Amino acid sequence: MNDIPELSLQNVRIANPEHVTEVIQNMIRDGQNKLQVVADFDRTLSKYTHRGQICSTCHNVLEEGHVLPEFYKDEARALRDHYFPIEMNPKLTIEEKIPVMVEWWTKAHDLLSKCHITKDDVRIMVENSTARLRDGCTWFFDQLQATDIPLLIFSAGIGDVIIEVIKHQATLHDNMKVVSNYLEYDDQGKMTGFQDEMIHVYNKNEGAIHDSDYFQKLEQRNNVILMGDSLGDLHMADRGVQNKLKIGFLNVKVEESLELYMKKYDIVILEDETLNVVNAILRKVL
Ligand code: TMP
């Protein structure tokens, strides 16, 4: 770990340094052909704050600017005010939360479907939004592409928005796959609904990957770097993994959540606007 000075920074917390050292050493030994990366999008690859100002998530992008009508923005915010505290309530079990999350996503998707946006609308909203990839994200994407390492971006947000953010602020390479909720359009290019089964915060696991042989095809890549910002992200790559390095970004309620995050994630990065720690690990492993 001494070889990676970023791991000793004040805002980087590691409960079990021996374990982290061992996993990184194994990844260095096994090399790039054994590695794959699985990452959440909002507040993991994208920033929570940019120079101190809170940034948009991919849902929030739709509530900024003048493209969508006021009734959409009001209702989307009212839904979030009601459901987000339930998502975050530590007193409820995941089993209790799942039907409530399905209800939220269903109502939010129905609401957006009433607005008949186009692909161009999505592009314009993203270009004018405050959604920002973390500093160092372009290097991260380019390096994974250059070394042929598959990157799965797994999000309960909106796939079309994620793709536009990446295209606008970095490059969408062919080693990258974005599994998320995608809009469906009619012949006139107007949105009519969503494709496939919904992905919400608590079904982000192999079952939600519609192309479900994704991990099977990558079976020989049994070293995984997993990156997330919520506890729901921990199950994004549960299958046949030999060495897993779980990196968690803790952006809010740091004091309240640190102990739990340190139990669940191998490395916890506090209130950071960059991917510097992940990139430093990658530089060592590749
Ligand atoms: P994820 O980005 O970690 O996969 O989770 C998606 C987040 O999006 C989750 O915290 C709830 C939030 N969300 C909204 O902000 N607005 C919405 O309309 C919906 C359905 C979810």
Image: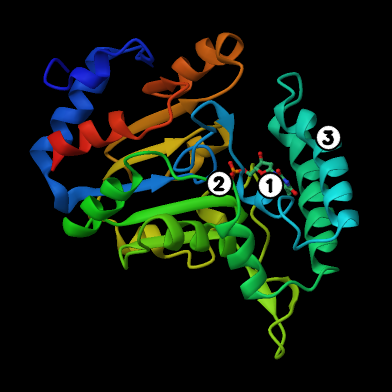
Which image quadrant shows ligand 1? top right
Residue 205's place in the image compared with 159, above or below, is above
> What residue is drawn where x is 71% and y is 27%?
88
Q: Nearer the viewer, residue 260 or 239?
A: 260
The residue tagged 1 is 60
Label 2, label 1: how many angstroms apart (C-alpha)?
A: 8 Å
Q: Are marks 2 and 1 in contact (CB under 8 Å)?
A: yes
Q: Which of the numbered marks, if any, corresponds to residue 81? A: 3
Asked if residue 2 lies left or right of residue 129, the reply is left
Q: Is residue 239 visible to the viewer in this orientation of the structure?
A: no
On the image, the x and y values in percent for residue 205 come to: 53, 48
The residue tagged 2 is 131
Look at label 2 and name its amino acid. Answer: Ala
Among all residues in the image, which is located at the extreme bottom? Answer: 187
Tag 3: Cα neighbours inside 10 Å, few (<14), some, or many (≥20)?
A: few
Label 3, label 1: how many angstroms apart (C-alpha)?
A: 13 Å
> What residue is drawn where x is 14% and y is 29%?
25
Asked if residue 36 lies left or right of residue 103, the reply is left
